[in-house]
């Protein structure tokens, strides 16, 4: 019995031929042909690994080591895990990598060394990092992560209630003055200017109430009006001459004083 086969992509034909044993006269020849589908399975391809998953703790402080940061992946055949920082999501500057084999997770930062042999990896808070895996052929998609810094709770101080009104001030003020003819309107009595001679009425209005003062002033300005024991605030002094002016053109002088 002999057999042969031929085939093309997708199908295969097998022919079997049988021959009678020696000594048999006129041996018959039997031929059987069978055609069937041919399935060819290609060897598995490594492909592009899926992006790894990063699980981080709630926060970290300075001097952080490995506790809490876990990097995991689902693809088989991963041989390296890479971590980059300083906003280098393209891994163009020296980054950190760690060799792995037949596992599906690892922790950072121990075991990660710089590709330029400058040292190991130290994870810091509030810093952007990027992680990927490598299966010997291709890099996976990139997964970014950032670990927030731990903040110590600061108690909120209890405010001290303020009094509804400030206590009365023990400081008192005094105002005094006289009336003169300010010929140059500079607000200062110059030596060439004389005082008003005659009776005047002085009225004070403000936080502290005082009775009006009426007194007679001479031209030498030796007599003056005085209000004492005044609290802080704004006061208006109104001076009205009583003598030497008729009722139709009597002037009224006012001045505003502020304490303190």
Image (cartoon, grey):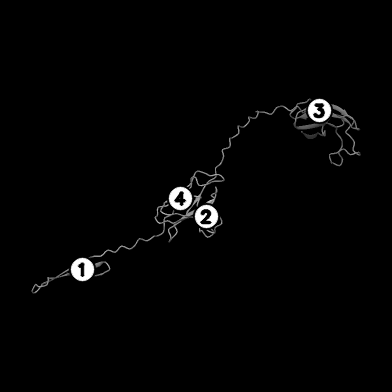
The secondary element bearing badge 3 is classed as: strand
Q: Nearer the viewer, mark 1 or mark 2?
A: 2
Q: Earlier in the sequence, mark 3 or mark 2?
A: 2
Q: Residue at label 4?
A: 106
Q: Residue at label 3?
A: 227
**Residue 24 percent location from the top left of the image:** 9, 72
**Relative horizontal placement of residue 224, taking residue 106 as reference (left or right):** right
Which quadrant would residue 11 be assigned to in this image? bottom left
Q: Gap in Å between the C-alphas at discs 1 and 2?
A: 59 Å
**Relative horizontal placement of residue 20, taking residue 55 as reference (left or right):** left
Towards the viewer: 178 or 58: 58
Residue 117, compared with residue 256, is above or below; it is: below
The residue at the far top in this view is 211
The secondary element bearing badge 1 is classed as: strand
The residue at the far front in this view is 23
User: Does the rendering let one see residue 144?
Assistant: yes
Q: Gap in Å between the C-alphas at discs 3 and 1?
A: 135 Å
Q: Which mark is residue 14?
A: 1
Towards the viewer: 194 or 116: 116
Q: Are marks 3 and 1 in contact (CB under 8 Å)?
A: no
The secondary element bearing badge 4 is classed as: strand
**Residue 115 percent location from the top left of the image:** 52, 58
Binning the other alpha carbons within 10 Å of mark 3 as few (below 14), some (14 to 19) or many (20 upward) gives: some
Q: Earlier in the sequence, mark 2 or mark 4?
A: 4
Quarter holding the N terminus? bottom left
């Amino acid at each position: 019995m002999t057999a042969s086969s031929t085939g093309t992509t997708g199908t295969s034909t097998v022919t079997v031929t049988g021959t009678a044993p020696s000594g048999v006269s006129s041996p018959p020849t039997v031929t059987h042909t069978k055609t069937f589908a041919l399935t060819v399975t290609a060897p598995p391809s490594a492909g592009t690994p899926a992006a790894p998953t990063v699980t981080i703790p709630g926060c970290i402080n300075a001097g952080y080591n490995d506790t809490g940061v876990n990097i995991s992946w689902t693809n088989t055949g991963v041989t390296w895990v890479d971590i980059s920082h300083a906003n280098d999501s393209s891994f163009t500057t020296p980054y950190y990598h760690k060799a792995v084999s037949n596992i599906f997770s690892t922790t950072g930062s121990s075991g990660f060394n710089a590709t330029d042999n400058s040292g190991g990896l130290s994870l810091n808070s509030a810093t952007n990092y990027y992680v990927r895996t490598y299966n010997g052929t291709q890099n996976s998609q990139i997964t970014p992560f950032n670990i927030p810094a731990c903040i110590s709770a600061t108690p909120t101080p209890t405010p001290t209630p303020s009094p509804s009104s400030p206590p009365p001030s023990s400081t008192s003020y005094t105002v005094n003055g006289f009336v003169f003819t300010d010929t140059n309107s500079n607000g200062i009595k110059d030596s060439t200017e004389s005082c008003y001679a005659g009776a005047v009425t002085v009225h004070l209005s403000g936080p502290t109430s005082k009775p009006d003062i009426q007194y007679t002033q001479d031209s030498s300005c030796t007599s003056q009006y005085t209000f004492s024991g005044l609290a802080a605030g704004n006061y208006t002094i109104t001076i009205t001459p009583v003598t030497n002016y008729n009722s139709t053109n009597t002037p009224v002088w006012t001045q505003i004083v502020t304490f303190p």
